[in-house]
Amino acid sequence: MAKKFVIIPDSFKGTLSSIEVCDIIESEILKIFNDAIIKKIPVADGGEGSVDAFLEGLKGNKVFVEVNNPFFQKMTSFYGLIDNGETAVIEMAACAGLPLVGNQKDPRITTTYGVGELILHAIDQGVKKVILGIGGSSTNDGGCGFAAALGVKFYDEKGEIFIPTGGTLHNVHRIDKSNLNPSLKKIELITMCDIDNPLFGKEGAAYVFGPQKGADPNMVEFLDQGLKHLALIVHQSLGIDDPDFKGAGAAGGLGYGAKIFANSKIQMGIETVLDAMQFDELAKDADYIITGEGQMDFQSLRGKVAIGVSRRAKNTKAKVIAVVGSLKGNKEDYLKEGISDIVVTNYLNLTFDELKPRAKEDMEYTVRLFLQSL
């Protein structure tokens, strides 16, 4: 009887995309089990490539639309439509991502305004749910640009309306949500977020992620104070005092803005993907579930892809195989979570620079060896 495999890996950052990993593993399976039934579910972490991963797994459509880029300039961006057009998948990186700013990194002036525009366009198409991935941002505006596009009004001390960026958050004097687009109440908004940083402070958005967006130590402190000021005005204007929830500091505070201004649910990325892909239904009669990620370590136990998959698969008969670039920590800790076997592709313990050009061949070789043992 034909074996059923569900392939559901994360990307191996810097070497292989999740779609490439799926294709490599599928190819090796078919060499040994030529009548295998295979379902591929590439996973993305909410950053660049998330829309393509969802569309690959669920065969939807990509929609192109003109919105504002990180510098308030017009650009052609995109999002995905799945579930027969009822769900939109949006990656904020498509209009506010770090690659879009090139050598002009400056989180004082970049905006998430385009993200809100993408959501409005999707709502106009009649979607009932929006899945928002917020990895890879160039911004530090606390989600204010996003909120402004959706109808939230920000006033300065003179009573004039403006769109705050990371560098002007300290000018926010009052916030008014009364003009928030009413269509938002008719949809479910889910924000994919796998980090638990608060909005501000030493573990917050500016201190942890600001440097990679171009902030020097002085700018980091300035940006952090701006986020703290924003939280104060949110408390005064909206009566909400919650800057420390898990994910508030994601994407320069877009995690905060999505929940505070648009009432978004913040959810682990892998849980969002598993739900959207109807994983429980797919996995119930699978013989093998092959998942994976670039490095399995203590952070994996917090719910990254491989462990998230193994936990959801515990009620199935399937054996869960984790294909990982490298393995750190105690192997037994991962096996306790429902993983049956771990395949390490960097079996020669090469450096990243040595590994990168041969990552595909090493994965093919190690996966083939393992499959031959089944």
Image (cartoon, rainbow, N blue to C red):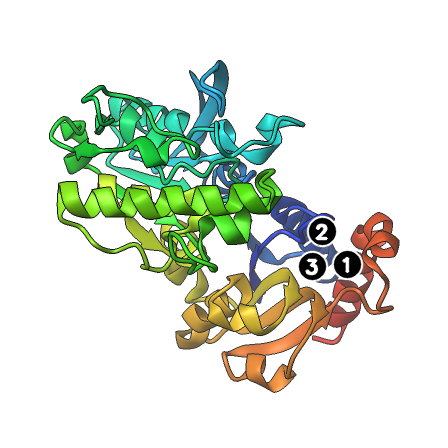
Write down the quadrant of residue 116 in the picture: top left
Q: In this rendering, does residue 56 appear at all?
A: yes
Horizontal arrangement in the rendering, residue 361 relative to residue 106 (left or right):
right
Marks 3 and 2: which is nearer the front?
A: 2
Are dots 1 and 2 in contact, CB under 8 Å? yes
Q: In this rendering, does residue 85 appear at all?
A: no
Task: Say which quadrant the C terminus sits in.
Answer: bottom right
Marks 1 and 2: which is nearer the front?
A: 1
Q: Residues within 10 Å of mark 3 (few under 14, many from 20)?
A: many
Indicate the position of residue 262 as horizontal and vertical percent values: 23, 39
Q: Which residue position holds label 2? A: 24
- Amino acid identity at mark 2: Ile
Q: Residues within 10 Å of mark 2 (few under 14, many from 20)?
A: some
Indicate the position of residue 110 as horizontal and vertical percent values: 48, 28
Label annotation for residue 29:
3
Write down the quadrant of residue 281 in the picture: bottom left
Q: Residue at x 42, y 69 (%)?
A: 312
The local secondary structure at tag 1 comes to: helix
Q: Residues within 10 Å of mark 1 (few under 14, many from 20)?
A: many
Write down the quadrant of residue 300 in the picture: bottom right
- Amino acid identity at mark 1: Met
The local secondary structure at tag 2 comes to: helix
Give me the C-alpha separation between circle 1 and circle 2.
8 Å
Q: Residue at x 35, y 35 (%)?
A: 169
Give me the C-alpha separation between circle 1 and circle 3.
12 Å
Label annotation for residue 363:
1
